[in-house]
Image (tube, grey):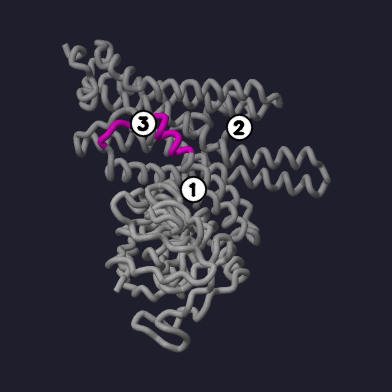
Amino acid sequence: MNELQVSCEGRRYGFEQNRVVRVGRSTDNDVVVSDPTVSRQHARLAFGPDGWVFEGLGRAGTFRRGSAVTRLLLREPVELALASPHGPVIRFEPSGPASPAAAPGPGEPVPAAPAGPGGPAAAGGAPNSGVTPALGAPARPAAAVPGAPVPPAGDPPPPAPEANGGPGRAGPFHTAAMPRGPVPPRAVGAAEARDELASAFQILVPVRSWLKDPGWRQGLRLLVIAYALLPLVFIALFRSSGNLTTPGWAYSLYVAPLWGVAFWLLIRPPEPYGKQELLIGLGIVIWVMIWISVVTINVNAALNPRSLGGALLVGFNEEITKALPILVAALLLLRLRAVKLDVRMWMFLGTIAGLTFGVREASLYTTIAIERIAAAALTHSANAAVIGALTFAYRVFVDGFQHAIWAGVSAFFIGMAVNYRRRRVQLIVFGVAIAAVLHALNDWYLSNFSSPWPWILLQALSLLLFLGYTMSAASIERTVRRTPLFRGESMIMEKFTEPGERA
């Protein structure tokens, strides 16, 4: 018997020579290939006068060694790739000699004579066989069953007879799901088109593979999802809230972590850092929140920020609120654990104190902005409504940032003061004074003048100082360490001093 062995996707099949073998993704095929790029009715194989013949049916195509094939005479084991040169591989292994061809009937072409030395088969194939061995396309189709008449060239092939001897006779390889006859061409074409469309969609929009992708465990993607959906969640949760501080809390807390990430990337505190620094940061947040409610707001209520003197007092009051937890944490860490952090770490922790202050302040000032928008709606004043909306956006997006850069500058000097004992008081006063003066000028100008351009220049100056210290913090500390004026030693900077600088 001339059996055909087929191997695909880890499964192996065996078929006798009187069997028409169908290959494809549909479950009614004899060889089912699960890959979505394979056609539903991809190919069929039948035993002819010259052996097993592979014939492609689907539009997806079949490839052998990178070249497309539509019809192939299997004289030896062959591996084909379905749908693409890199698609699923199917292996065909014919066994036994080919059966002799049946005698030709009236009007049929004479079959080729057996190949002999120097004969046509020696040149690579039998003449008029219609098949190039293991390659090329046919001159005419081969008969599906031995002994069946071969139609003249150009005529369509006759329908293949049912396997195992005719209707109703189930052979050893027969399954109930196997069709009893050929599928109508129109039905096959419509099903093939729908199947190709579904396969293309699965390839171009692989939702299942996305859901199983381990990349979802990366924090950045989760952060993007949260920041894309949180504003919509705010609307759903707070649309019926009558508390005007709620939008200020929600959106300023929404923006503050983004500024925190930006400050971390700008300052780049050196390693090591870990749980200790995380706990210090949490303590600073708690301190600032409590101190504002208990001390800062009550002191500011007794001051007049419209005068320059009152603005200076407000500036010192608020900058001390942010600087005090930095100083306390640094001194406690030095006293209890004999640990000095790098000044860049204290600078970053200072920005955390500033962001916390800005979030708390935004919850108060956004209330005023919303009331201004509501009043503008009652008076139909578009200009007042625009100013109210811009004020709300400024408080939510920029207020915390402003407080953070001032607090970062003062925290830099507090870190220097902890590292250099002799000039400790002077460094602390100098750092807090810089931040307080910038803060006071900002508040005083906003209270007394209408043109925004000098205020913008003042903000640019604050930003210039902050960015300058982010770039030169380590080099400034190295210079201070070598200067006799300070007479101090930095435990942390030993690791960051070049060998030539220690002399």
Number of dots carrying numbers? 3
Image vertical order of residue 477 relative to residue 375, above or below:
above
Near-viewer residue (472 or 95): 95
For label 1, count other residues whose C-alpha is less than 10 Å away and answer few (under 14), some (14-19) or many (20+).
few
Q: Secondary structure at mark 2?
A: loop
On whether residue 26 falls in the magenta region, the answer is: no
Sequence-wise first label, 2 or 1:
1
Q: For the magenta stretch, what is the residue range?
A: 259-272
Q: Position of residue 209 (x, y in %)?
A: 43, 58
Query: Which image quarter: residue 498?
Result: top left
Q: Are marks 3 and 1 in contact (CB under 8 Å)?
A: no
Q: Is residue 419 left or right of residue 179?
A: left
Q: Are marks 2 and 1 in contact (CB under 8 Å)?
A: no
What secondary structure do most residues of the magenta stretch adopt? Answer: helix
Q: What residue is disc 2 on? A: 304
Q: At numbered mark 1, what does the secondary structure look like: helix, strand or loop?
A: helix
Q: CA distance from mark 3 to mark 1?
A: 22 Å
